[in-house]
Image: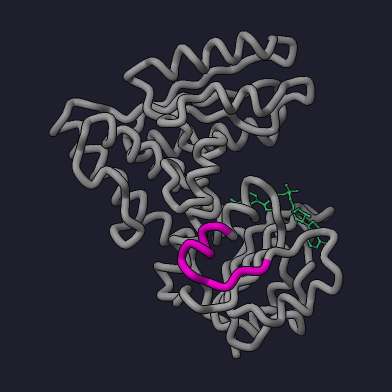
Amino acid sequence: MTAKIIDGKSIAANVRHNCRSRVELLKRSSGITPGLAVFMVGEDPASAVYVRKKIQACADVGIQSHKFLFSHSDTQDVVIDKIRELSADPRIHGILVQLPLPKHFDLKAVLGAIDQEKDIDGFHLYNVGGLVVGSTVFPPCTPYGVMLLLDNSGVEIAGRNAVVVGASNIVGKPMALMLMQREATVSVCHAKTRDLAQFTILADILIVAAGCPNLITGPMVKSGAVVIDVGINRLPNGQLVGDCDFEAVSKRASMITPVPGGVGPMTVTMLLVNTISSAMRSANVANADFALADL
Ligand code: NAD
């Protein structure tokens, strides 16, 4: 079997096209331009690249972005005060704090300062709790993007065995909750899992988000499985790879996401979706929540 490639780039491009139309419609009907505030503390070069990409993506669909840069020596209180100010600003519909924060910052306190109605990353405890009961305000972007890739590719979820490798707060755990919400039978594996292969081999849908190149080899994958590789790893030779041995796994899977060009383009795109949903809700537009089927 040679797996069909799930083309995240092209699916993301379609979603962005849809985003552009929604922004134009919102501007015309309510005079509202969706606004996103992006916070970055310190000078982490990788974070700077991500922030630049997010700001470009906003411009691409007509979202007004505002960048707030703080130095490593700025206090947490200064950052929190600004977040609170923007939480009350009606021109801002989404607030994003680029992670990681410097070590001396209290992540919970900073994320907790964001108005839950503007927490477009979905990291506020209110949104995390909402995810548990299936009614989150903003689904976290990476797993939200994965759900869209699955739906767009016609993958049946209910009743299937889904295995999530990786149990982080931003990818693995919310991913497992979203799949559970859609009635998959979900197993979650992590670095302490003994004999990873005994779980992965049972997966009809295998989602890998561990950050370990070549963690998933061909024999670990059930024939015909759908494999979503969330991992992004830079090899010493500069090559960007995921967590799967792409060549070997492609021979077993029925569908697979490439790295790059799979999950990555979806993550930033879902940030745009959440920001636009928030702006539409603020304008009391009916159907403000993008149904996945609409995208
Ligand atoms: P993390 O380091 O916070 O969590 C990694 C998880 O994987 C942990 O639960 C850990 O226990 C588990 N893990 C680590 N080694 C393992 C092993 N050998 N076997 C089984 N489980 C193992 O990372 P994260 O933020 O969840 O990100 C995971 C990967 O996804 C990274 O490569 C990251 O760059 C990538 N990522 C990609 C996107 C995207 O848009 N494509 C978004 C977020 C993260």
Whether residue 137 is in magenta: the answer is no
Q: Which residue is at a point 46% across and 74% down the rendered structure image?
A: 158
**Residue in the picture at 74% in, 10% down:** 73
Magenta range is 177-187
Left or right of 150? Residue 108 is: right
| 154 left or right, relative to 289 | right
- Residue placed farthest to the bottom in the image? 1
Residue lying at 46% horizontally and 42% vertically, measured from the top left: 271
> Residue visible at 74% across and 72% down?
245
Q: Is residue 203 above or below residue 190?
A: below
| Viewer-closest of 201 and 135 | 135
Dividing the image into 4 quarters, which one contains the N terminus? bottom right
Looking at the image, residue 69 lies above or below residue 93? above
Q: How is the image coloured?
A: one colour
Instruction: Name the spot of residue 279 as percent of width and height, x first.
Output: 31, 32
Q: Which quadrant of the figure contains the C terminus?
A: bottom left
Q: Residue furthest left?
A: 29
Q: Does the magenta stretch include residue 183?
A: yes
Q: How many labels does the image show?
A: 0
Q: Where is residue 151 in the image (x, y as percent from the top left)?
A: 41, 68
Left/right placement of residue 4 relative to residue 275 reads right
Location of residue 52 in the rendering, given as x and y in whole percent from the top left corner: 54, 32
Residue 27 horizontal/vertical position (percent): 20, 31
